[in-house]
Amino acid sequence: MNAETLEAVLGRLPDLRIGVVGDYCLDAYWTIDSSASEPSVETGLPTQPVRRQRYSPGGAGTVAANLAAMGVGRVHAFGVLGDDPFGDAMRRLLVEQRVDVTGLLTQTDEWDTPVYAKPIRDVTEMNRVDFGNFNRLQDGVALALRARVEAALPGLDGLIVNQQLLHGVHTPFLQSELNALMARHPEQLIIVDSRHCPEHYTDCLHKLNAREAARIAGRSYGAEEVINQSEVEGYARDLQARWGRPVFVTNGPRGCVVAEGGRVQVVSGLHIVRRTDPVGAGDSLLAGVTVALACGETPLEAATFGNFVAGVTVQKLFQTGTASPDEIRAIGASPDYVYQPELADDPRRARFVDGANIEIVESVPANLRLTHAIFDHDGTLSTLREGWEQVMEPVMIRAILGAQYASAGETLYARVVARVREFIDKTTGIQTLVQMQGLVELVKEFGVVPDAERLDEHGYKRIYNEALMGLVRERVARLGRGELDVSDFAIKKAPEFLRRLRAGGVKLYLASGTDEQDVIQEATVMGYADGFEGRIYGATGDTAVEAKRVVLDRILKDIGAANVHQLVTFGDGPVEIRESRKRGGLAVGVASDEVRRFGSNAAKRGRLIRAGAHLVVPDFSQLDTLLKVLRVVGA
């Protein structure tokens, strides 16, 4: 979905009218603060004091809330609530979001408003407390609900049918009523998202997750078992053939499979740097898919738009998040996709150039004629900063735990370490200052350090740089004294590879997330700065200026977007690979082992493939073969 189409969809949303019929649940978040706990007079057990309580619509309410938040002009809710305070809260929350609640009925007997109460202690969600598991929908209420839906249907641009609860509104009686309604309105856009009974609805589009699709096909998977993409595509194809309508099958972070007209296409998952919470992601995607279809977009474009919506909401923790038009626009303007996750996770699938350790992830374009080459520095050419992760990790852990660094319990400490390692892994290659902005968010997330003691990104960067530059200065000094030489800090044959590219008429650029003056100094120390002829770029202190993006855009401006086949990017981090891939350039991942300076790093290989690398090399030791693959003549 290009920017023009994205804007067109967002612009048409205020004119849409969408209905949502289904299980309206309330999500309750209760933040427990044990500091105010006291023994119960009645039981003697310690109480669990609630410091904060928050409520938001869940189930069909999440879908309705997402539609309203993204700017749909009129959202109609159809469901059943209990005669209880939670039902009142649900109505109030939906009205606050401009949802029409005249279709929400009340059943006074044998019905509680469904509630998922989620106690949270120390940023960890504890066992849920559920209401509504023993509900029984009366046939008379079901008939009244169907009548409300049918009366509104001619005025709707789309209807979403949500089924989430085993003991919700979707009784066999209501299913038959809704099926009859669908059969009477075959021209209406109706999409069903049913957790337990999608096969009971036929005259409609379907959105399912991979496990739901597998169950209908007679397959079952364990909770930790991965369903590979080819299987998901097969399930989607079979279901589309069975129902004769488009089918959308989500597969978690691996994206969404779209089956229509006998074709199966995949919308890749999004690369999200921040911590994510997948709860409600399917509802968000469903809302996005529906509005895009109502705007006349193809199922593939609709799934892409829904993917953007879900990409926003998964970043909102401990809440059933929604996505505003500006948030959708921000993530959709330049999306970061995850490429070939199965290949990334399984090196047994790797294909190599004959007799070489050059992995072919995707074939090199036939029209490749290189004139410009961009290199990342640290880990791609140089290992002067090898070990930066081991420097950054303790800096971040200490920043997050503050005065409690030495006294924090084992559980909290382990959570912080795991979170920091995940963050460093996801942000490899971006500007240090941007990483430190992420650290500020991590400090807030854990809430151990008081606000008054929290530093900004510049303060944390100073601490990190002081630790890292001590390591770099010591290595540079040893080079200067002749105790070590350039080969001790260069990825295998990197300097020679640079020389050979220049001999083949290729212009070289160096672009790094490290501060620019440091990149220039370190490239000079390594002896290859002159080969870049002044084209060395790094961080300038402005997080809005990403050196790798700037260089790519500058080159494309010079050579023209039609000549992107003349551009290659080499890097060991996801950022340069993603940015090159977005612009259509060839991306070569360097999965370097920075300790040995030759051979492959398996973790890097996976990251680089996910980022979109066309080729992956461990180093430049097989430079003759690599130059041949890249079709560089005269090198």
Image (cartoon, grey):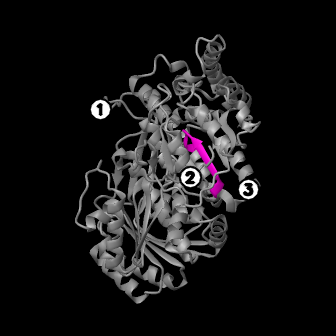
The answer to whether residue 177 is magenta is: no
Residue 412: % across, % down: 43, 28
Q: Nearer the viewer, residue 54 or 440?
A: 440
Q: Quick check: 576 above or below 483?
A: below
Q: Which residue is mark 2?
A: 336
Residue type marked 3: Ile
Disc 3 or 2, which lies upstream in sequence?
2
In this view of the protein, can residue 376 be seen by the observer? Answer: no
Identify the residue at horizontal 43%, vertical 55% (top origin): 254
Q: Magenta residues, as a range?
A: 565-575
Q: Quick check: 215 above or below 254?
A: below
Identify the mark at residue 559; answer none if there is no mark: 3
Identify the mark at residue 43; answer none if there is no mark: 1
Q: Report how far apart the C-alphas of labels 3 and 2 lie in the structure.
A: 24 Å
Residue 284: % across, % down: 50, 60
Residue type marked 1: Thr
Disc 3 or 1, which lies upstream in sequence?
1
Binning the other alpha carbons within 10 Å of mark 1 as few (below 14), some (14 to 19) or many (20 upward) gives few
Image quarter where the C terminus lies is: top right
